[in-house]
Image (tube, rainbow, N blue to C red):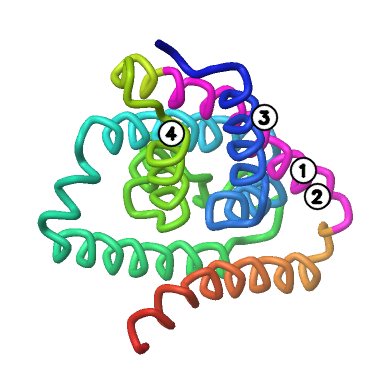
Amino acid sequence: MTLSLDLLMGFALFALVTSITPGPNNTMLLASGVNFGFHRTIPHMLGITCGFFVLVVAVGFGLGAVFKTYPLLYTVLRYVGAAYLLYLAWKIAHSGPVSESEKGDSKPISYLGAAAFQWVNPKAWIMAIGAISTYTPMQGYFTNVIVVAAVFAVINLPSVGVWAGCGTLLRNVLKDHRWLRLFNWGMALLLVASLYPLMLESFS
């Protein structure tokens, strides 16, 4: 038995809201759209969607249970993710002007880099666990996991594309080096701010 239409519609709404709202992925895509344009950001977008698909399937097929049994592994993964986010924030803050990014050493995040990042992205884990625990019926479970992951991917790709597109539209506005520098620092600070829930939980 696969998901009922009502459950599928509810899940589709969940997938849309969680995919299109601000988070580390979308913040980086907005910055990449500004600095590199939409076309050069496509591998980043595809990496997010494919990496997240694999993550949802892995959580559905038992990785979530492993972390429940060995919570220290999850804690380590979260802090590795936090460290990587700080590194990405530093890279965004020091991105060059648009013209320099197009012909210099600065490069957008690769497909594999974006896919791997999903495994240390706190929001991605929350989304994956929420999708499996809330919207995946036990009857026909393995089929339902694949359906949930596939529907999430179909909704996720255009959702993240909106952020890359918005960044691309801002390129002309931010050709002034001073404004671009302020924008990049703002995006870097937003990435760092996304770690606030993790830090709050750690010190509570």
Between 163 and 167, which is closer to the camera in this rendering? Answer: 163
For label 3, the SS is helix
| First in sequence: mark 1 vs mark 3 | 3
Q: Quadrant location of residue 145?
A: top left
Report the residue that reaches farthest toward the bottom: 203
Between 126 and 55, which is closer to the camera in this rendering? Answer: 126
Say which mark, if any, is on residue 111: 4
Q: Quadrant location of residue 173?
A: bottom right
| First in sequence: mark 2 vs mark 3 | 3
**Distance CA(mark 2)–CA(mark 4):** 22 Å
Question: Left of 139 or right of it: where is 188?
Answer: right
**Distance CA(mark 1)–CA(mark 2):** 5 Å
The x, y position of residue 114, in whole percent, is 43, 42
Say which mark, if any, is on residue 158: 3
For label 1, the SS is helix
The x, y position of residue 80, in whole percent, is 27, 64
The x, y position of residue 44, in whole percent, is 52, 37
Name the residue tied to disc 2.
171
> Are the residues at dot 1 and dot 3 in contact (C-beta closer than 8 Å)?
no
Say which mark, if any, is on residue 32: none
> Are the residues at dot 2 and dot 3 in contact (C-beta closer than 8 Å)?
no
Based on the picture, tell me whether residue 150 belongs to the magenta stretch. Answer: yes
